[in-house]
Amino acid sequence: MDAEKPNRMKSAEEILSHLSEIIAAMHHRPKMYAGSATDPGAAQILDSLMFQAHHIWGHIQDRDFELVDAVHTVSTKFDFGSRNFFSGYRYQHPAAPEAEVFEFVRACWAEVSSRLGIDLTDPNQLR
């Protein structure tokens, strides 16, 4: 630990900015977070990670209900009921290849992000 640099808690804005970059990175490089799109279970992992990242993002801003509404809006388009994006798609398309399910999950979360106003610009393009 650097003795000259005091510890400090990051502000909500700093945390939110960092989390937004992580969400954008997850959209641009989902394999880095969930494994290969063809790996069994990768789509389910991606769905869970996206949910958790968006949940924290919404909670930091007290926008939990907006997140629920955005997820519900996207889910309703596909008649998933209470199923998450992975389970809903897999239920309706049991023979779908893993990569197709993976991309579907990523696209659903991209729409949720867009509805919430999360900037999905690739963070690596900003550096």
Image (cartoon, rainbow, N blue to C red):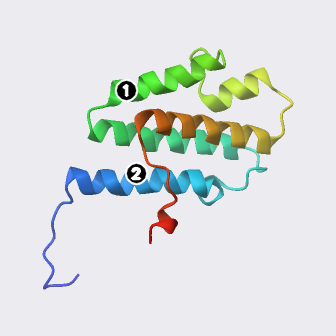
Left or right for 47, reference 7: right
In the displayed structure image, the side of residue 14 where residue 36 appears, left or right: right
Which residue is disc 2 drawn over?
20
Task: Judge by depth and name the residue closer to the eye, 22 or 7.
Answer: 22
Q: Residue at x 43, y 22 (%)?
A: 69
Spatial separation of the CA atoms under disc 1 and disc 2: 16 Å
What kind of residue is marked 2? Answer: Ser
**Label 2 Cα crowd, 10 Å radius (few <14 / some 14-19 / many 20+):** many
Question: Looking at the image, which residue is at 67% across and 55% down?
Answer: 35
Q: Nearer the viewer, residue 59 or 107?
A: 107
Check disc 1 and give the amino acid type.
Glu
Residue 11 position in % (x across, y down) = 19, 55
Extreme residue toward the right, this view:
95
List the residue tagged with mark 1: 66
Check disc 2 and report its element: helix, strand or loop.
helix
Q: Residue at x 67, y 24 (%)?
A: 88
